[in-house]
Amino acid sequence: MNDTINPFRHRILLVDDSPSIHEDFRYFLSPSKNHSLAAEEMELFGADEVPDVEANDFPGGEFELVFAYQGKEALELVKEAEEMGAPFRMAFVDIRMPPGWDGIETIEHLWAVNPNLEIVVCSAYSDYSWHEIVSRLGRTDRYQILKKPFEGIEVRQLAATLSEKSRLRQVYLRQIADLELAVADRSAALEDAREAREAAEKAAAAKSEFLANMSHEIRTPLNGVVGMTELLSSTTLDEQQRRFVSGTKASVNCLLSLVDDILDFSKIEAGRLELDPVEFNLQSLVEDMAEILSPRAEGKGVEICCELVEGLPVMAVADANRLRQIILNLLSNAVELTEQGRVLLSVHPESVGGTETMVRFEVHDTGIGIPDARKDSLFQVFTQVDASTTRKFGGTGLGLALSRQLVHLFSGEIGFDSEIGKGSVFWFTARLGRSIRPEPNLTPPAAFRGLRAMVVDDKHASLDVVRSILTRWGIECDLCEHPLRAVSDLQEASASGQPYEFLVCDMQMAEMDGMDFVGSVRALSDLQDLPIIALASIGQNIRGDLCSEWGVSECIAKPVRYSMLLTAVERSLNHGVPGELLQSEMDEIMDSALLSPPMAIDGKRRRILVAEDNEMNRLVISSYLRSMDFDCTLVDDGRAAVEYASTGTFDLVLMDWQMPEMNGVDATIAIREREQMSGSLARNHSRLPVIAVTAHATSGDRGKCLNVGMDGYVTKPIDKQSLIAVLSRHLDAVTPGEMLAN
């Protein structure tokens, strides 16, 4: 065989024991100038004249002939060709080749090595009939019969046709192999994807279980905090104590918002978190956030203020919990990263539509600032300004990433401006719906207009906030940072016949203590009756008897709240009705961020079974129920709950989700089974309502409560209104009204 193989030529094997046949095929399939076969071809196809034919153009230039005299020799050539990767396209095989294999045997051996080899069986006469050939070689399109003597055109056409057929078959088989390889790769990839999906599903299930358990562990003690705070608020408290209780409740609500956000982080990652719009008091929500962080800020010597620009709606419709979470994140960061100076929460309307308002929230601080190199990554998960901030100020860096996701759900934007050493301004916008209910009337009395007031405080932010509110009311406002100068200015104004109608002063100033300042003012005979409104930190004692002792007309806590300042001014100037002012204060003490009409339920002659393993939670729930005149029985595990419920002496069961011995799910299933056998377990001989008391916050767990036969659920931590709401859906004699006294 030739040492050099041309990959662009069809390789043809001729197997014949006659040298003359070899010469004939060399003649038939080799190109030659003015080849006589060209004339034959033209004559065959009816051409009038025979053109000159160049050797390179003549059919046959694409063939490479290889010769063998016997079958075994041909077999070795075919094997060698396969090993070299240059297989034969076709073979002309004589049927009679004595001695050795005949043509049929040779073909069988050749096909064992190259099953796709095209064969032309050549014979003048045959030792085989057509039936015998077919029985040996099969009915296949891989062989043709060519009778001797050979026609050159016929040989050439068979060579060209079968070689091209073989080439196309190889292309086809190669494409099939490539396709099979691609399919195998795709199948392997799909299998990997399936395994990855199964692993992800297992991980998601494990994460969900972990989050549910974490929710339970966190919410169980929080239930005690909320419950005890609720019970404490129902006792006789002075103004300062009521304010502390209100702050505790607001802080717990924010902590619950944090827990909910962490539990829903997987939904945020998947883009499946949805907002839950409710009607709420925007002004109270914003002021609550500043008040919650006030003790922490005051402990560092940092002033925190809240400014609500004129034009903001008081009532709005949006997801108040999520909005609270964003504000809390930004304010917390500002307080943590500010060691001196102030933190200001400013809120103003950016655009107002018929049913919506785009509101802009800004948090200004005088903190450490943010280096340019860290600004691009600030909103990424677990990113801090630098590594030292984590050690010095604490935190995970998760809040800003969560806030960005939540802001997008409000159809808003979030960003910041910052300068090293001078502080930062973090801002975001949120699209809030407008409430259909009338706005609360916070308009000050007309008599306020034209009054003169002096505000004394050595902190710029507080001065600006108080001046902004008083100016909005039409009160002319003069500011003074120095208490000694303020005493002189007050005396001069009185002597000139243009006295100030009232004074607002801080109780903690560097130059002079607030009590000393008030004493200096009261020492002047013409200022003894001047109304004085004192601003005290939330940690200061602001009892009414001390205010009178100091000579203070009214005392309100910082950060200044709009309605509290309005109440104080009204009282100090005797422009308000005492009953109305008292109601205004009570509205401030209650959690006014979320509006839910108070409800009451008559629990007399009602018996409720409480299944709860946590002692603090049993105390809270039983206190709630007994305050509403319910008769309640307490058990601490699921088995006892089943036995007591089976007595038929209860109107409703409050069933904890997780308990020892038997959990709430299994206990409910057992109750339903006994109910099915006996017909009824409730005192009124109907279906016994079973309400899940669950710390699990995911929708899947809530759905599971209902699927196992529970009639409803209430989520820990339980407040009294939530408990009344769920009881009202399953017990009769429910009437809306004011909260029953405990």
Image: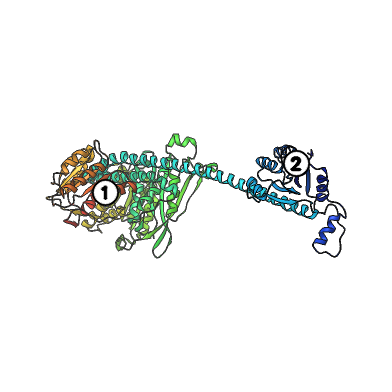
Q: Is residue 524 visible?
A: no
Q: Is residue 146 above or below residue 390?
A: below
Graded by Cα atoms within 10 Å as few (under 14), some (14 to 19) or many (20 or more), the crowding at tag 2 reads: some
Front position in the image: 640 or 189: 189
Q: Is residue 302 above or below residue 465?
A: above
Q: From the viewer's perspective, is the residue at label 2 or at label 1 nearer?
A: 2
Front position in the image: 537 or 647: 647
User: In the visual, does 459 lie left or right of 721?
Assistant: right
Q: Quadrant of the N terminus?
A: top right
Q: Label 2: which residue? A: 97
Q: Residue at x 65, y 47 (%)?
A: 132
| Secondary element at tag 2 | loop
Q: Label 1: which residue? A: 713
User: In the visual, does 622 lie left or right of 393?
Assistant: left
The answer to whether the residues at label 2 and label 1 have Cβ atoms under 8 Å apart is: no
Count of numbered circles in the view: 2
Measuring from the top left, give residue 291's x and y in whole percent: 34, 46
Measuring from the top left, give residue 90's x and y in whole percent: 72, 47
Alpha carbon separation for disc pair 2 and 1 = 95 Å
Residue at the extreme left of the image, as rendered? 605
The amino acid type found where label 2 is placed reads Met
* Precedes in sequence: disc 2 or disc 1: 2
The amino acid type found where label 1 is placed reads Tyr
User: In the visual, does 22 lie left or right of 305?
Assistant: right
Measuring from the top left, give residue 311's x and y in whole percent: 39, 60
